[in-house]
Image (cartoon, rainbow, N blue to C red):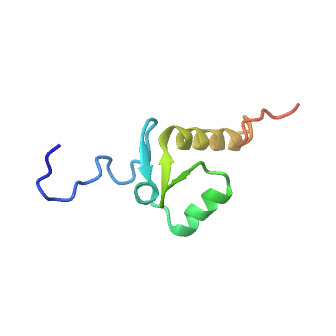
Amino acid sequence: MISDGRKQRDTAADGAGIAVGEVVPLATFRRRMGLSVSAWRALRRAGFPYVEFGKRTWIVGGAAVAWFQRLGDASRGMHDVNNNMPQP
């Protein structure tokens, strides 16, 4: 790809989140999701999946989407965030 010297804008619209098959730097993910530093820390403490490689933190789309889906399922009583079904 030939660059014309202008900074490339993120192809996803702001607030678009992350897609399966996408790997983005933490700063991009936080901007898209509208997360503050303290909100990111809370996600990390809750077990949100991320990868540290070199000096950067990366978010893998498939893992992030699956984590949010499990969190949503847990809030509806389907299973907990560790993917365990509730015991009768």
59 shown above or below 66: below
Which residue appears at 56% of the width and 50% of the height? 50
**Picture mark count:** 0
Q: Is residue 14 left or right of residue 79?
A: left
Which residue appears at 46% of the width and 57% of the height? 26
Residue 8 x/y as whole percent: 22, 54
Image quadrant in which you'd find residue 74: top right
Which residue appears at 17% of the width and 43% of the height? 1
Which residue appears at 48% of the width and 52% of the height? 58
40 shown above or below 79: below
Residue 62 x/y as whole percent: 51, 37
Residue 88 x/y as whole percent: 88, 31
Residue 85 x/y as whole percent: 78, 32
The residue nearer to you, when weighing 50 against 36, is 50
The residue nearer to you, when weighing 69 against 5, is 5
- Pick out the residue farthest to the right: 88
Image quadrant in which you'd find residue 86: top right
Image quadrant in which you'd find residue 76: top right
Q: Is residue 22 left or right of residue 83?
A: left
- Pick out the residue farthest to the left: 4
